[in-house]
Image (spheres, rainbow, N blue to C red):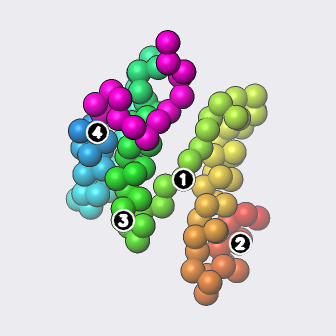
């Protein structure tokens, strides 16, 4: 039996799904857009997201992929605040030097 861990290798042949998701995210006429990935334990959700990340990483000027592991925050009373904190830190880290001080205000 295989471990239930995400992978960069497409064992489940989900690369087509990842390509379609990347195309949807790239279509400016659909913005703003939210995509959901649903499925039971071990069905390849995390691996599919890693494949999407690989697709988007090829265009770093267009996309910033922010990883958030909700399991790490399952006991937090306000997981939404934890998510916003992770997003804010990622945006600050990627801000151009001329915007660093302004971006720091996101962190409060």
Direction from residue 78 to residue 33 in the image, left or right:
left
Q: Which residues are magenta?
A: 1-14
* Residue receiving disc 2: 104
Residue 59, label in figure: 3
Question: What is the C-alpha distance between the residues marked 2 and 3?
Answer: 25 Å
- Residue assigned mark 4: 15
Quadrant where the C terminus sits is bottom right
Q: Residue at x 28, y 31 (%)?
A: 13
Q: How far apart are the two marked residues, 4 and 2, measured between alpha carbons? A: 37 Å
The first of marks 2 and 3 along the sequence is 3
> Alpha-carbon distance for marks 4 and 3?
17 Å
Q: Secondary structure at mark 2?
A: helix
Real-space Cα separation, disc 1 to disc 4, in angstroms: 20 Å
Reply above or below: 14 against 39.
below
Q: Nearer the viewer, mark 2 or mark 1?
A: 1
Q: CA distance from mark 2 to mark 1?
A: 17 Å
Q: Position of residue 45 (x, y in %)?
A: 43, 30
- Place residue 100 in its image quadrant: bottom right
**How packed is label 4: few (under 14 Cα within 10 Å), some, or many (20 or more)?**
some
Whichever of labels 1 and 4 marks the residue nearer the N terminus, that label is 4
Snapshot quadrant of residue 96: bottom right
Magenta-drawn stretch contains 3:
yes
- Judge from the rendering whether residue 80 lies leftward or rightward of residue 77; answer left or right: left
N-terminal label among 2 and 1: 1
97 or 107, nearer to the observer: 97
Q: Nearer the viewer, mark 1 or mark 4?
A: 4
* Foreground tag (4 vs 2): 4
């Amino acid at each position: 039996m295989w471990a239930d861990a995400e992978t960069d290798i497409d064992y489940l042949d989900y690369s087509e799904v990842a390509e379609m998701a990347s195309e949807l995210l790239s279509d400016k006429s659909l913005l703003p857009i939210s995509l959901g990935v649903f499925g039971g334990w071990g069905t390849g959700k995390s691996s599919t997201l890693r494949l999407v990340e690989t697709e988007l990483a090829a265009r770093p000027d267009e996309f910033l992929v922010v990883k958030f592991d909700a399991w790490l925050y399952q006991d937090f009373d306000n997981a939404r605040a934890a998510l916003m904190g992770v997003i804010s830190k990622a945006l600050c880290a990627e801000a151009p030097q001329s915007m660093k001080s302004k971006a720091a205000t996101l962190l409060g």
